[in-house]
Every structure is written in C-alpha cells, then in structure tokens.
Amino acid sequence: MMNLTRNLHRAIPALLAGGALWLNAAAAAHAADLYVSAKGSDTNNGKSAATAFRTLKKAAALVEPGDTVLVGDGEYTDAETGGGSAVLTLSRAGRPGAWITWKAQPGQRPVIRPVGWQGIAVRTSYQVLDGLTVLGNNDSITLIDALKDATPAKDGKLPPPNPRFNTNGIIVEGRQNAPDAKPHHVVIRNCTVSKCAGGGIAAIEADYVTVEDCRIFENAWYSRYGCSGFTTLDNWAFDDAPGYHIIVQRNYVWNNKGLVPWGKIGKLSDGNGIILDVTDQARQGANNPTGDAATAPSATAPAPAAPAKPKRPEWKGRALIANNVSAFNGGSGIHTFRTRYVDIVNNTTYWNGQVVNYEEIFANNSQDVNIMNNVIVPRPGGRVTSNNRNTNVRWDYNLYPAAQTVMTGPHDIVAEPRFVGITSDPTSGGFQLVKNSPGVGSGSLELPLPTNILNRPRSAARNGGRNRGAY
C-alpha cells in the first residue's frame, strides 16, 4: 500500500499532463467547414449554411482531415437496420494535428434518432463529437416485448437479435478492424445520449478515448447484452505512452439500467452508470456482456471453428474517472471489472444498484485502483463498496453516511454529506454540498484535479483541503 501511495504522488501530475497533450491536439488544425441541415439537400455543395447537405452520411463521405462538420437543428435518422447499421458511421480518419470534428452549429441542437444498431459508430481515429444529441426509442418499447425478443425458443436458441431492442447511442467500435487499425484518439464532449435500448456510450477495442461534459441517461433498459450508461471493453493499446489514455470526466450519468436478462447467463446484469471492463487479460473470469453479440451455437449443429483472433496487446495506459455524478442506475455508479490502472476521484454517486444490487463504487477483480475524494450514498439497503479479488486498491478520503468495513481509509468520513438537494435529474442543481457539509474542504490534494463537474476551478479551502465529490 505504501508503494501505491508513493507512486501516486509521483505519477498523477505527469499523467494529467500526458492526457492534456493529446486532448489539446484535437484542436490543432482546421481545414474547412462542411454544413448539414434538416433543411438542406445532398445535391448542395455543403460549404455554407445556405448550401448545407441533408444527411450526415453525405458529409461523412466527403470529410477530410482537419475539417469541421457543423450540424444544424432538426432530426437525422436512417432506415437501415442491418448489422453495423448507424445513422452516422465515421470511417474516414483524421490525423495528428488534423482531427475531424462533428459539431452542433452554435446555438442549435441537432438530434440523431437511430432505428438500427447505433446512432453514431466511430470506426476510425482522430475524431471529435461535440454537442450532438442521440435519442433512442425506449419510449416506444414495452418490457414485455423486449423480454419476448430475448426469450429462448423450445430448442434453447435465442431468436436473431433485433436492433429495435439493442440500439446503442454512440459506439467507438474496433472489433471489426485489423489489429493495427483499431480506433484511437476519440473525444466525445457536450453530447446527450438517452433512451437507447442498448448502451449509451461505449468504446470497444479502442484506446485514447475521452468522454466529458456529457449527459448519459435512461439507456440499456431493453438490451439482451447487459449494457450500461458508459462502457469501455477490451481496451486495445495504441501505444504504451504514459498519461491517461481513457478519461471520463464531468459527466452526469443516471437511470441507466438493464431490465432484460443477459442472454449469455440468463440473468440480469450490468446497467451500470460507468464501467471499465476487462483491460487486464491475466485476471480470470467471464467477460461482462457488452461485447458479446452472438448466441451460443447449437449442440446438435456446432458452428465451424472460427479463425484465431489476434492476441490483444497488453494495455498499460491509465484511466481517469473524475468529477462525475452517477445516480439512480440499475448497476453500480462506477464499476471496474478485470481492469488495471484506474483513478476514481472526486465523483458523487447516489442510490445506484437499483436492479442488480451492485455496490455504489465496485472494484471487482481489479488491480492498481485509487478510489479517493468521492461522496458515496447508497440507496436504503444498498452497499458502499466491495472487494472481490482486488490487488493494490487505495481507498481513502471518501465520504459516506453509514460505516462499512470492506475498505476503509484513515481519512474517510462517515456522515451524511448534506446536499443542497436531491433531484431525479442530477443536472438540475442537486448533489452540491452545503457550506457546512463534512465534505467541504476535507478532501486530499494528492490528485490535483484543476476543475470540478461545472468545469470551474477546484480551489483549495482555507485549511488547504479540497471538496470531496464532483462539486
């Protein structure tokens, strides 16, 4: 434990600097603007708001490194529902210093309405998504229909998956890419992803992914694959450079839950607010379900042997989960499973585990995880944390209302955090600490996060400490 603490002091400033370098590079060059509008036409040239394209696919076919695609008000959809279908697929790569940006026009709120497998599929690198909204079809689905779709027939086979019940919002998808062409350097910011029957935002077999200042809510309800609000799965190392490769910060994540059993195990699973899943190949245990998209072969008609998959390179980067509010989710507020090298810092979690009774912050079979400066409030009967086959977990400076003995730190505070208010929509002002909260000014300075969830400076209190939690 002492080695982990000593390394933390040395590593965090460098890690923060490393993460900032590649994030800042996303704005390094700007070649040209392309415009898309619900009032446009794909016969236009797309070079001005008055001559905008109508579809996102048209812009995607023409965009070049360094370009910015400005998307105007209106709804954007696509009728395709086949495998890999998306309203917008990003397959043209940017390059270092010339990222491709997809951005809402100033003051406008374009809405992407998927009916296929995903709203936005990012299959390449050096991409920025900024200010876009993906709105799924949960409101038109009933649980009884979703359960019927995921119920095995008499022969034990599941019916073919229907995207209607499994639509993902935004997915950074590397599973179909060659080993040397996995997506990396992707920034998703200021986006709203909600009511998608599958996962909200996910990154699978990717590296250098940042999700920040987003609202991710009411996703994962009806999928047979046990999805969550935000997921990384099977990180695929682009390089071994120091610094944060995965950054999840300043997001509001709420009411994501799984109501349909994961087909692989026949039980309810996941529905977490935030989960980092399987970065550590050496640690044993079944994968969580987000990446499993095929049913088991029939015992009487075995499928032909698939070619051996290339070995996933060891992921040596680090992940930062900071300044998030994660509340009312069906699984954990924040969960790591078979994952290494994570800092879970200055988050606020509240009343999670509402479907599968997972703990609020749940490090599971993980290694080298720092859990510090968090405000953690379990639902009635819920649990603060767990410790299942973990190694080198630093737990300290956390604030929670009821004593627990699973993991404790010398600077933990067991007391009510005293929020300004509790709101079903966390973005409406609740979950801030009152001035005389025990979490005010009592946090550690070991992890020098410069801002809070509002992207305002996180200044030290008179006693030298900082606030615990996302604010």
Image (cartoon, helix red, strand yellow):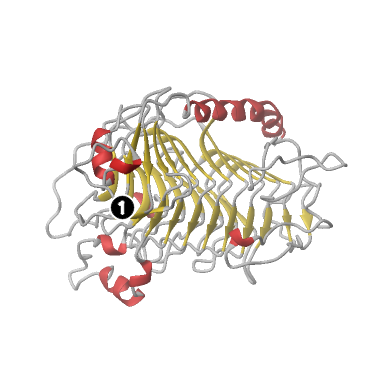
Q: Report the residue at 38% width, 30% height from top.
A: 313
Quadrant where the N terminus lies?
top right
Observer-nearest of 93 and 102: 102
Image mark count: 1
In the depicted structure, whether residue 13 falls above or below residue 452:
above
Q: Residue 246, position in %: x, y?
A: 50, 37
Q: Which residue lies furthest to the front in this view?
A: 50
Q: Residue 280, position in %: x, y?
A: 46, 38
Name the amino acid type tagged 1.
Ala
Whether residue 444 sits left or right of residue 116 in the image: it is right
Whether residue 462 sits left or right of residue 107 in the image: it is right
Q: Is residue 428 visible?
A: yes
Q: Report the residue at 20% width, 65% height from top.
A: 159
In the depicted structure, whether residue 393 falls above or below residue 423:
above
Observer-nearest of 301 and 53: 53
Task: Determine which quarter of the picture holds residue 35.
Answer: top left
Q: Name the residue under label 1.
A: 38
